[in-house]
Image (cartoon, grey):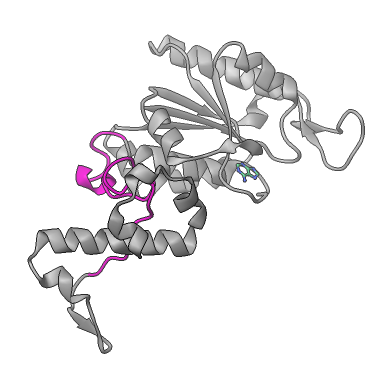
Amino acid sequence: MRLDVVTIFPEYLEPLNVSLVGKARARGQLDVRVHDLRGWTHDRHNTVDDTPYGGGPGMVMKPEPWGEALDSIMASGEAEGLVKPTLIVPTPSGRPFTQALAVELAERPWLVFAPARYEGIDRRVIEEYGERLEVHEVSIGDYVLAGGEAAVLVITEAVARLLPGVLGNAESHRDDSFAPGTMADLLEGPVYTKPPEWRGRPIPEVLISGHHGKVARWRRDEAFRRTSENRPDLIERCDPATLDKHDRAL
Ligand code: ADE
């Protein structure tokens, strides 16, 4: 998968050299290219923003550098045989970023990220590329960041770990909170490792019972309990068919 990120803070994307994403890059599973938006400005001050039409606080990112940046990146991908990127614009006004969207994006060969600073990017950029590409405006949560770069890191990590061969153990996806499958709609429960007792706290006995059915039941109950406590909205929303008699008794 190829990923391009256009930003006025290329150094903010340094974490893409580390850990899971860094290793996927080193193995050639991910081709990440970070670009400085100011490279597509032509004035002495490398201006990327201006005051908003209609007044109001803050500044708006100018359309011209974004247009040049995106055209040039698209031409470079096309020269390498790629067809069209999917454009991701992180914004608190976007639709929520979910595991389902991460799964969808992990199937795309080429993602381009356009993280904004200030009050956002001139709307005409989103309109223009919306007519040429698949464009997703996404929010990573109901809070406002100083810019979209942190959201790019979040989205990239969620997508990269789904790429074939990136996680050591493909099974690790199976019980992910929000993953489709057995624990549908429930958060992941607690986990334990050795030693069997730590500071007077033993691990739950069932985990060393050797009884797979009981372990599965316990995991399911814990997942249900945690979801009820932390995310009652998920229980409300879930398809009653995915709950069993045992859940309802908890
Ligand atoms: N930019 C600023 N806040 C954001 C958020 N919550 N999600 C995505 N991009 C953002």
* Residue 176 highlighted magenta (yes or no): yes
Q: Could you tell me which quadrant the N terminus lies in?
A: top left
Start-end of magenta stretch: 163-192
Q: Nearer the viewer, residue 205 or 75?
A: 205
Residue 212 relative to residue 233: left or right:
left
- Tell me which corner region of the image, top left, top right, bottom left or bottom right, holds residue 246: bottom left
Front residue (pair 120, 220): 220
| Whole-percent x, y for residue 26 in the image | 30, 39
Tell me, yes or no, if residue 27 can be seen here. Answer: yes
Q: Is residue 206 left or right of residue 27?
A: left
The quarter of the image that holds ligand 1 is top right
Q: Nearer the viewer, residue 27 or 141?
A: 141
Q: Nearer the viewer, residue 42 or 249?
A: 249
Residue at 92% over, 34% down: 55
Q: Quadrant of residue 139?
A: top right
Look at 42% across and 40% down and name the residue there. Answer: 99
- The quarter of the picture where the C terminus appears is bottom left
Q: How far from the left and from the top, in percent, is residue 101?
A: 45, 34
Q: Where in the figure is residue 37, as x and y percent of width and height?
A: 64, 30
Please tell me whether residue 219 is drawn above or below residue 194 in the rendered image.
Answer: above
**Residue at 65% in and 51% down:** 143
Residue 121 in which image quadrant: top right
